Image: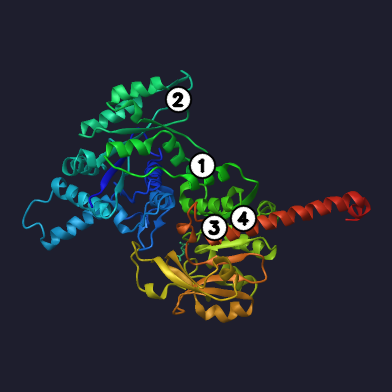
Amino acid sequence: MSAKYIFVTGGVVSSLGKGLAAASIGCLLESRSLKVNLMKFDPYLNVDPGTMSPFQHGEVFVTDDGSETDLDLGHYERFTHARLSRDNNWTTGRIYEQIIAKERRGDYLGKTVQVIPHVTNEIKAAMKKVGQDVDVAIVEIGGTVGDIESLPFMEAIRQMRQEVGRENTLFVHVTLVPFIAAAQELKTKPTQHSVKELLSIGIQPDILLCRTDRFLSKEIKSKIALFCNVEEEAVITAKDVASIYEVPLVFAHEGVDALALRYLHLAAKERDLQQWEELVRRVYNPKDEVNIGIVGKYVEYEDSYKSLKEALVHGAVAHNLKLQLNWIEAEGLEADEASREAQLEEYDGILVPGGFGKRGIEGMLQAIRYAREKNVPFFGICLGMQTASIEYARNVCGLAQANSSEFDPATPHRVIYKLRELRGVEELGGTMRLGAWTCKIEPGTLAHRVYGQLEISERHRHRYEFNREYEGVVTAGGLRISGATPDGTYVEMIEISEHPFFIGCQFHPEFKSKPLEPHPLFRSFIAACYEYRQQRKARRHAEEVEMFLRPEKLARR
Ligand code: GLN
């Protein structure tokens, strides 16, 4: 079977939501029973985003096979059933790495190695691999049209149309139609320029997804159609929405899927978006809310914990709740106790997410101590599990100097230390314990109740591990090891049984949560938080009644 290809490019500015657009098109095609796959090309020279700062690049999304990929792959997995791997995300760096290895081996038989055809051939081969065994392969090109870096990718998709045919390729261009307040007008010029730029490299877009904050009138659409050489019907209003899960519905309403099928000469079933409609209905009609505090680093940058945020939304929506997320810079909690308590008191649950390096660790430990002592639901992910173990060792088991060798290499109590399999490995790129690994859960634990099964598979990305030499001390103190690798090498989950909800996991469950299949850990964590919220409310109410009935008691206090 030869796939049809949809190429998604972006114009005018970055951050227009190309990844979400690609994912939403995939979702719509799946809703018509087509099989899709998605991939992204990133035009930078890093081999993968694994070594890049979350400030620069946002979250690193980890796939089952342990690839460190762009966060857009997270959208692809959440919106479709495509199974993604290292084949689905390529950077310029990785393409060149491959070509240079071939050149050094002598594979090019004395030829001059050039961008065209060698680089473009490599890019096309990667696309065709993803196109195997599916009806449609959706290919997103990172960056913005006009960037020098993305030219080889643009050239490769131009060639693809020549090679596999007009009826097998579709060019979707995501662009911006801004509303200029001073003129009270929507402006089409940036879109015109962007399409002109595309035309100059030989690509005529078929569909324009116009990002805008209001509906495009028929006049505006026909103006864009005329200047950009596309059908009026193919000028799509991609209006801003409050929830990303509404995007497929917006596209469906604008007929994007029907249009794509027509251009691609593809027959498909009627669209069935019932589950998505139900999801969006729930997102917009919550019965109550839940207030979660995330204590970490990089928290002021929204993209650094993309999957985590979405997984929490999934957990909240599963209970018809609206998620109030509060990002708390861990360093800010290190100061005095009173201000820390005043800050943390607001939340129905506290979460410490993954992270690297020393900054903010003491603040995280304080937040964990607060959650543990005050019975506030706590969820620690990766670094969050490691810090929870340290906090327990310090404050419950009396090992005041307990630490991770990541933060204090000289600590006498290395409760967390470098993964034994990584001793002596100093290189940073791709050297962590990565991807999906099996974890065996202890029967009768909270983890067991949450998952409802004793064997799970979750994705990892870490360089340090729990030191089992300290297992005796911490378990005697009451911490429970609730999950480990089947051979017992690595601790995967910890919990405190007497606490309403206190779980730490070495893996990243957020990578596997989907809006239609919320992850059990997030679903249960949110349920515990909501329960805590209700109890707290009831307690406060009772206190108020008490004060009203017995003011003398209040006076004595
Ligand atoms: N820095 C810790 C480690 O490398 C935690 C990593 C993470 O949270 N992803 O093990």
Tally of marks: 4
Where does label 1 land, which residue? 243
The residue beneath circle 2 is 179
* Residue 333: image tag: 4
Q: Specify which label sits upstream in the sequence, 2 or 4.
A: 2
The amino acid pointed to by label 2 is: Phe
Closer to the N terminus: mark 4 or mark 1? Answer: 1
Q: Position of residue 218 (x, y in %)?
A: 40, 22
Instruction: Decide: is 39 above or below 62.
Output: above
Work out which quarter of the rendered image holds the C terminus and state it. Answer: bottom right
Q: Does residue 124 lie above or below 416 as drawn?
A: above
- Which of marks 3 and 2 precedes in the sequence? 2
Q: How far across and how far down the image is residue 384, in percent?
A: 54, 63
Disc 3 residue crowd, few under 14, some 14–19, many 20+, Cα 10 Å: some
Front position among marks 1 and 3: 1
Q: Is mark 1 within 8 Å of ligand 1?
A: no
Q: Secondary structure at mark 2?
A: strand
Q: Are marks 1 and 3 in contact (CB under 8 Å)?
A: no
* Residue 335 visible in the displayed image: no
**Distance from label 4 to label 3 (Cα)?**
8 Å
Helix, strand or loop status at disc 1: loop
The amino acid type found where label 4 is placed reads Leu
Query: Looking at the picture, does residue 556 appear above or below residue 436?
Result: above
Question: Does label 3 point to a residue whose CB lies under 8 Å from ligand 1?
Answer: no
The amino acid type of the residue labelled 3 equals: Gly
Q: Which residue is mark 3?
A: 360
